[in-house]
Amino acid sequence: MLGVDEFEAFVFKALEIEPSEELLDSWAISYEKLQSRLTRNRKESLQKNSSAAGEQGAGDIVRGIVHAGRTFRIAQRILSIYPPAAGRMLEVGAGIGPFAFAAHSMFGEPVTILEKNRRMLRNALNLFEAAEMDVPKSIHGDATQPITYRQYSAVFAPFVLNEILTRVESEDVVGAGRKQVKSWLTACRRGGRLYILEPGTKEAAQNLQRLRETLKDEFQIIGPCTHDSECPMLNGEKDWCHVTWRIESGNWAQKIAERAKRRFQDLHFSWLILENRRPQQREPDSLRVMDVRRNDKNKLRVVTCGTSGLETLVVQKKNRATYEAFDDYQSGDELRVTLSQLERKGDGFRVTSEEQIKHRRSVMQSVATLLDNQT
């Protein structure tokens, strides 16, 4: 499986730019400007249509090396846990196409790129050529346009839905989002999957979960939800459904972030995977790890979400083997645990043995397994 440094090398080749320490200052300035527009002034920037793909040069480097590099790494992790079926795949609002690039490099299936900015679309095709991969089919158009081909095995929509919803003039943001998501889903054949990534902000995450509430009776929810109950964090003020991953940054992405005095180690995002088929019965003991809290030197607290809502698993340090195993847990992992078989105390359900965890689907273990299978 391709590493993020290799991805960066292909991006530089696609953009026909030689990486240089002398250019770091201009790249860092561009990164700071873009981050400011996408955080403090996000809504205003998007409503003015001045977001993602405007500037050339330094802007293309930032979007390709920093932003697309992160999406590429997230895609590898998500796809290693929840792979699509064989067949042609589509990335909408693709930019340079990092999600499709990850999927094609992992599975070898043909991909299509849909992007409204002609320069970014050309950059995406150049990226595949730089990696000596099959050049994808390209569609010049907006992510909201109707999709006539209805047999995709997967549709990828990374960090694009919130941009679409920001431009919605109606107050019915959820209704507009539902219409868009159903349009993408129905471009998938039966059993095809839609992968949505969104920022980890409260607004974006809760909008995504409100959409999930309107779709869960029509389509199969693959993740992050392990249940069909109402989201317990739907209206939370301090907690909302998102994950924080320590994403491996490439060498140049790290240099750009450091020069801009920005953090690069952790990435916060929300996600939703739906499958184009009727909902099936879910595993009742399945839990999603939302957070691993290590602020108590004597115990670990693993916050999970399941059928009964938010529940905390607690491992005391005196149970050394179990404690060390749980210290490897991270946000996004999926567990199977029968809570009724655990002792409940004031701070949560006590776990005293690894055997009480029937199954763990680990993000990093899935990536490692995929790497082993490809060597």
Image (cartoon, helix red, strand yellow):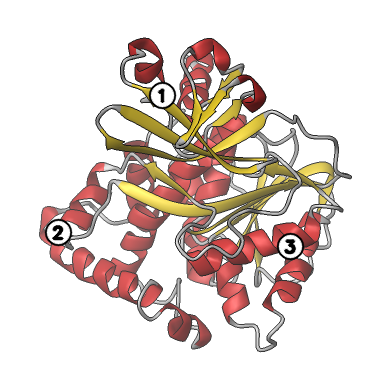
- Which residue is labeled 3 in the image? 181
Q: Nearer the viewer, residue 240 or 200?
A: 240
Which three-letter amino acid code belongs to the residue tagged 3? Val
- Which residue is labeled 1 in the image? 315
Which three-letter amino acid code belongs to the residue tagged 2? Arg
Badge 2 crowding class, 10 Å Cα cut-off, few under 14, some 14 to 19, many 20 or more, is some
Which three-letter amino acid code belongs to the residue tagged 1? Val
- Which residue is labeled 2 in the image? 259
Q: Nearer the viewer, residue 336 or 301?
A: 301
Whole-angstrom CA distance, mark 3 to mark 1, is 39 Å
Whole-angstrom CA distance, mark 1 to mark 2, is 40 Å
The relative height of residue 72 versus residue 40 in the rendered view (above or below) is: above
Classify mark 1: helix, strand or loop: strand
Q: Nearer the viewer, mark 1 or mark 2?
A: 1
Q: Nearer the viewer, mark 3 or mark 1?
A: 1
Classify mark 3: helix, strand or loop: helix
